[in-house]
């Protein structure tokens, strides 16, 4: 999960396996409308958990790092 200060949104990717369920979905929370919207990014990693995300304000991009 990462906070995008430019658009004042939170970006959430994936989730912890729970009850045999993992996710490779990306969701965006918009503070101004108090809503979650499923995103459709061009590049979607495989299902995973324990990833780390950060927002790079200089490039206006959310970056995800995963250790293999």
Image (cartoon, rainbow, N blue to C red):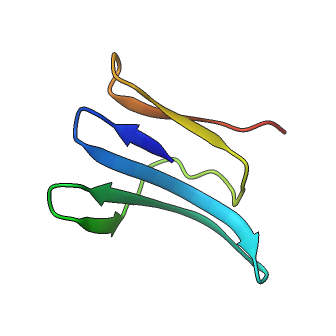
Hey, which residue is sitting farthest left in the picture? 32
Q: Position of residue 21 (x, y in %)?
A: 72, 78
Would residue 27 be found to the left or right of residue 16 on screen? Answer: left
Residue drawn at (24%, 42%) of the image: 8
Residue drawn at (37%, 49%) of the image: 10
Q: Is residue 67 above or below residue 29?
A: above
Quadrant including the C terminus:
top right
Q: Position of residue 48 (x, y in %)?
A: 72, 56
Report which quarter residue 22 is drawn in: bottom right
Would residue 53 be found to the left or right of residue 6 on screen? Answer: right
Q: Is residue 53 above or below residue 12?
A: above
Residue drawn at (44%, 49%) of the image: 42
Hey, which residue is sitting farthest right in the picture? 68
Would residue 26 be found to the left or right of residue 66 on screen? Answer: left
Q: Position of residue 25 (x, y in %)?
A: 53, 64
Q: Is residue 52 above or below residue 14?
A: above
Q: Is residue 68 above or below residue 19?
A: above
Q: Position of residue 46 (x, y in %)?
A: 69, 56
Hey, which residue is sitting farthest bottom in the picture? 19
Looking at the image, how many numbered discs can be counted on the residues? 0
């Amino acid at each position: 999960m990462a906070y995008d200060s430019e658009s004042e949104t939170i970006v959430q990717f994936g989730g912890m396996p729970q009850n045999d369920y993992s996710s490779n979905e990306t969701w965006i929370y918009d503070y101004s409308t108090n809503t979650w919207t499923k995103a459709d990014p061009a590049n979607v990693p495989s299902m995973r958990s324990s990833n780390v995300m950060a927002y790079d304000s200089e490039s206006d991009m959310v970056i995800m790092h995963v250790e293999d």
